[in-house]
Image (cartoon, rainbow, N blue to C red):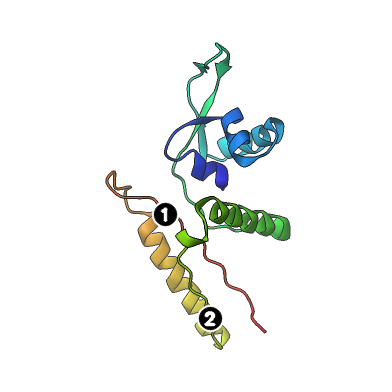
């Protein structure tokens, strides 16, 4: 998810991504290729870098997702949470708007609440990007609070 965010405003090469993420280029390339294969990134035409080497820039396609983790639920949830925390570290806690609420609801009201929240997020996700607007991210998580 951080790779998608980093490549939204301008294309970045694998080396640039790995440097910004503090990861080795091979690991970053593995993730970049998966994101290209699933339509979240696109590979742009190769260009010559500052030293004349051939570079492949990657750009976010703007595709959004609602995470459905399936069989790899725990590992992917941990990765999604880690990406969120990494993004918060990048922008700083002062740039974060937070709300934490605890509800005591029957299951049908709980499902209704989550459906309504997702509907609002989907509505805004489907709007065309405003060139004069500023980008921001929303991370929604719900959990049992016993």
Extreme residue toward the left, this view: 132
Q: Could you tell me residue 134's position as x and y percent?
A: 34, 50
Q: Could you tell me residue 74's position as x and y percent?
A: 72, 60
Q: Could you tell me residue 9's position as x and y percent?
A: 42, 39
Residue picked out by circle 1 = 136
89 over 29 or under it: above or below: below
Which secondary structure, mark 2?
Answer: helix
* Earlier sequence position, callout 1 versus callout 2: 2
The crowding category of the residue bearing disc 2, from other C-alpha atoms within 10 Å (few below 14, some 14 to 19, many at least 20), is few
The reply to whether residue 138 is visible in this rendering is no
Is 107 on the left or on the right of 22, as rendered?
Answer: left
Is 5 on the left or on the right of 23, as rendered?
Answer: left
Which is more foreground, mark 1 or mark 2?
Answer: 1
The crowding category of the residue bearing disc 1, from other C-alpha atoms within 10 Å (few below 14, some 14 to 19, many at least 20), is few
Residue at image coords 57%, 72%: 142
23 over 53 or under it: above or below: below
Residue at image coords 55%, 20%: 55
Residue at image coords 39%, 55%: 125
Which secondary structure, mark 1?
Answer: loop
Q: Could you tell me residue 140's position as x and y percent?
A: 52, 65
Residue picked out by circle 2 = 110
Q: Quadrant of the C terminus?
A: bottom right
Residue 28: quadrant of the picture? top right
């Amino acid at each position: 998810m951080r790779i998608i965010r980093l490549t939204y405003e301008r294309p970045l090469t694998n080396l640039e991504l790995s440097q910004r993420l503090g990861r080795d280029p091979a690991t970053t390339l593995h993730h970049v290729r998966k994101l290209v294969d699933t339509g979240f990134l696109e590979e742009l035409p190769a260009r010559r870098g500052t030293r004349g080497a051939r570079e492949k820039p990657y750009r976010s396609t703007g595709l959004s997702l609602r995470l459905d983790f399936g069989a790899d639920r725990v590992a992917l949830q941990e990765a999604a949470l880690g990406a969120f925390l990494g993004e918060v570290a990048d922008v700083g806690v002062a740039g974060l708007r937070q709300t934490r609420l605890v509800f005591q609801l029957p299951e049908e009201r709980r499902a209704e609440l989550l459906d309504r929240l997702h509907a609002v997020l989907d509505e805004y996700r489907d709007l065309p990007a405003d060139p004069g607007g500023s980008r921001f991210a929303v991370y929604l998580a719900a959990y049992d609070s016993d």
